Every structure is written in C-alpha cells, then in structure tokens.
Amino acid sequence: MKIKFLADPGHGWAKVKRALLIELGIEKEISAFSYQLGEWVYLEEDCDLSLFLKTINEKGVKVEFSDHFARTQSKVRSYQSFRSITAQQVKP
C-alpha cells in the first residue's frame, strides 16, 4: 500500500482514507492532533500514525511512503481537526 507522507519544518502527516481507518477499527482512536478534509484523514506522525502502522502491519499489509516536504507551513495545518464520524453525529 502506498501512502503519501506530507511534512513541513515542524511536523508530518500520513494521508489515508477515513474508510480504511473504519475498516481497521481504529477510527474512534484517532486524536484531534490529526486533520481531515473530505474523505481523507491526515494522521499526525507520532501517536496516530504509529497506531495505524501497528494495526495495518498486524494485517500483513506492507506500507510504502512517498514523501512530500514543504519548506514553509503545510496546508494540512489549515484543515479541520479530526473527529470520528461517531463524534460528529453526537449532538451536545
């Protein structure tokens, strides 16, 4: 599986489809330090990406990254903070 990894001078994110997180059963465990835009989730490189990699590796799937580095602040930082679909459906 090929995954795009985007980074700026301060942090990095892996771009994966939300449906994959749901399929893996980890969508509710992703933190608000990750971002979302449409069907895509940008997993922050520390805890959330580590959780994803651990889970997908347990399924026997090999991951290959394509790296994309920005010299200035990444546009990923302007996306909405991640919320699981379940959390989005719950009204306060």
Image: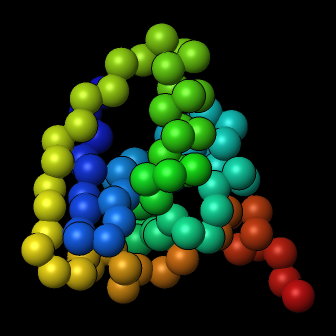
Is 89 or 41 nearer to us in this picture?
A: 41
* Figure check: 43 above or below 88: above
Residue at the farthest top position: 60
Total numbered badges shown on the rendered structure: 0
Task: Estimate the x, y position of residue 18 in percent, counting from the top left.
Answer: 51, 52
Which residue sits at x=23%, y=69%? 8
Task: Estimate the x, y position of residue 15 in percent, counting from the top left.
Answer: 35, 53
Q: Please state if 15 lies on the left or on the right of 31 as rendered.
A: left
Which residue sits at x=35%, y=65%? 11
Quadrant of the rendered structure where residue 55 is?
top right
Residue at the farthest left position: 71
Q: Which of the image's four quarters has the C terminus?
A: bottom right
Q: Please state if 5 lies on the left or on the right of 50 as rendered.
A: left
Q: Is residue 66 visible?
A: yes
Is 69 or 42 nearer to us in this picture?
A: 69
Which residue sits at x=48%, y=80%? 80
* Figure check: 71 above or below 1: below
Residue at the farthest front position: 10
Task: Estimate the x, y position of residue 85 in percent, counting from the top left.
Answer: 67, 63
Task: Estimate the x, y position of residue 26 in percent, counting from the top left.
Answer: 66, 42
Q: Is residue 39 visible?
A: no
